[in-house]
Image: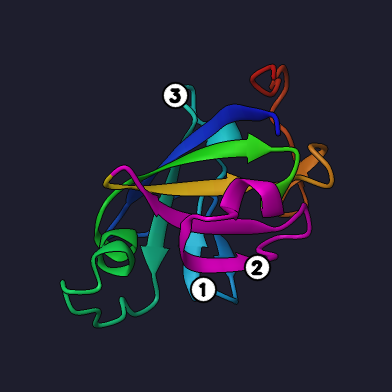
Amino acid sequence: MRKAFDHIGLWAAEPQPGEFWVEFSKVWVTNPRAHPMRIEYLRAKEKPEVPPEQVGLWKLWNWPHVAYRVDDLQAAIQGEEVIFGPFEPGGFGPVAFVHKDGLVVEYLQYNTLEHWFGQPNPPGWQPVPW
């Protein structure tokens, strides 16, 4: 399985320019391809009440995450503590969140890198090579 860095996800309390709505998770997200440091801002419509005892799921809704592009999502999550997904957030391929090494990790298996939630990539944007 190949894996490459994709973005960092940070929680935001206020609306962010260029947000996209993700129905499955009830979260607005920004395009990390438009940020020079590949940061995706997330903002929940209503943050779910998750008890801290559900460590991975609690971290998903309260901590940043690191995201990797993978060529085989099922291989990436096999044997992992999956905390959310897999699901299809925006017409570009499935994603899943896992709790790994004390962190929240998102794996994305893109069907296409041509767009982010239907919007074209910023001029000059290139994915991190495998």
Residues under numbered marks 2 and 1 in contact, where contact means CB atoms less than 8 Å apart: yes
Report how far apart the C-alphas of labels 1 and 3 lie in the structure. Answer: 24 Å
Callout 1: few (<14), some (14-19), or many (20+) C-alpha neighbours within 10 Å? few
Q: Residue at x 64, y 20 (%)?
A: 128
Q: What is the span of residues highlighted in magenta in the rendered image? A: 74-101
Question: Badge 1 is on which residue?
Answer: 25
Q: Nearer the viewer, residue 88 or 90?
A: 88
Q: Which is nearer the N-term, disc 1 or disc 3? A: 1
Question: Badge 3 is on which residue?
Answer: 37
Residue 87 part of the magenta-drawn span = yes
Q: Nearer the viewer, residue 119 or 23?
A: 23
In the picture provided, is 110 more to the left or to the right than 69? right
Q: Which is nearer the N-term, disc 2 or disc 1? A: 1
Which mark identifies residue 87? 2
Report how far apart the C-alphas of labels 3 and 2 lie in the structure. Answer: 25 Å
Expressed as whole percent of the image width and height from the top left, the position of residue 1 reads 71, 34
Callout 3: few (<14), some (14-19), or many (20+) C-alpha neighbours within 10 Å? few
Report how far apart the C-alphas of labels 2 and 1 lie in the structure. Answer: 9 Å
Q: Residue at x 25, y 79 (%)?
A: 50
Label 2 secondary element = strand
Expressed as whole percent of the image width and height from the top left, the position of residue 14 reads 30, 59
Furthest toward the left, the residue is 52
